[in-house]
Amino acid sequence: MSNVKISALPAATTPLTGTELVPLVQSGVTSQVAVSNIKTAPAGSNTQVQFNNASAFGASASLTWDGTSLTATKLAGAHNGTVGATTPSTGDFTSVTGTVSSGAVATYTASGANQNIYSRYIGGSPNVANVYVGTDSAAGGISGIGGGGILWNVGNGGLAFGTNNALAMSLSTTGALALKGASTSATGVGITFPATQSASTDANTLDDYEEGTWTPTLAFGGGSTGIVYGGRVGNYIKVGSLITAQCAVDITNKGSSTGSASVSGFPFTVSGTFITIISSQLVSWTGAGPCQLFLNSGTTASFYGIPNGVGLGWTALTNTDFVNTSQFYFTMVYKV
């Protein structure tokens, strides 16, 4: 093989098996070595990932692989879904880990202030930017500990929470928390329940709250012919199944209807006979004793009194016990 140019040699069969021998000069002596023993020392230290650094091996402590986890501490990029060096400005992350068998997992631990995780919609379709946590068969969530939390910035929109792709509750920018089925346009700070109660079977669950007004209507024998009101107003508060109803009525003409006296229009139907009269007063009537209202069923209460002011018997009041200038006020608590 003397004086034979390398270019004149026949081509070797590839790929090489590693057992082929090649000459090399080592310490001034020409020797032979198997291809499998020709190695270049890796760059960096143990677990650092190798990369092409100007045609030479390069490595960095910012990217390591220990056979199980890939750790990156300087992921750089600027836009469109890449991890950005502009937000946060340093681009520093402690770890990005993943297990192929169970799906990708990303862990970000802030080492300073104003370091955030972003899911940002920039354009195109669909126009959403969601962060999903958990799976259909396992619980998932995002929690803030020691002053941390969730900051949601999507225009002037609120923050929605749900499970299985269904809305469970939403938080408005004003601080109103709307539970499932409640109005999401509520203003102010507070908790909004659905307009129609979704009753809970748990005795320890508050499942409804409502404030409103109602119109009290005076009747005699179920009729209200000719009754003229100088004023009437009613309001109520509903907490769970408990109603507190208030009423103030004055008349200028009691009309021509006859029979037992009653007031109707209560905002909710009473359940059973759970009733508490906190206070009641009938002004300008023909009797001398106290009077009360009893809400036994439905939404209509009956007047009872002790006309002579003596004795223990309560008598149902009628149109004859009222005058054209009668007034009545009461606060009643009952259960629905």
Image (cartoon, rainbow, N blue to C red):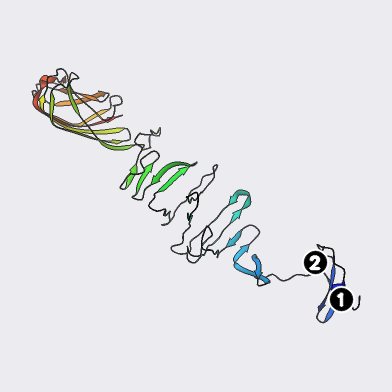
Q: Quadrant of residue 278?
A: top left
Say if 132 sits above or below 41 in the image. Answer: above
Say if 116 sits above or below 249 in the image. Answer: below
Residue 223 spot, x, y in % from top left: 18, 20
Residue 109 spot, x, y in % from top left: 50, 60
Residue 148 spot, x, y in % from top left: 43, 56
Q: Residue at x 69, y 69 (%)?
A: 42
Report the Cα–Cα distance between label 2 and label 1: 24 Å
Q: Residue at x 85, y 69 (%)?
A: 21
In the displayed structure, does residue 107 sit left or right of residue 247?
right
The amino acid on which the numbered mark 2 sits, given as a three-letter code, is Ser
Which residue is nearer to you in this view: 52 or 146? Answer: 52
Q: Mark yes or no: residue 282 visible.
A: no
Residue 203 spot, x, y in % from top left: 38, 34
Say if 27 sits above or below 196 in the image. Answer: below
Which residue in the rendered view is the most extreme toward the bottom? 28
Q: Label 2: which residue?
A: 36
Q: Label 1: which residue?
A: 5
In the displayed structure, does residue 53 sit left or right of residue 115?
right
Which residue is nearer to you in this view: 85 or 50? Answer: 85
Packing grade of label 2 (10 A; few <14, some 14-19, many >=20) is few
Which residue is nearer to you in this view: 46 or 63? Answer: 63
Does dot 2 land on a helix, a strand or a loop? Answer: helix
Q: Nearer the viewer, mark 2 or mark 1?
A: 1
Q: Which quadrant holds the C terminus? A: top left
Does dot 1 land on a helix, a strand or a loop? Answer: loop
Pointer 2 or 1: first along the chain: 1
Q: Residue at x 84, y 80 (%)?
A: 29
The amino acid on which the numbered mark 1 sits, given as a three-letter code, is Lys
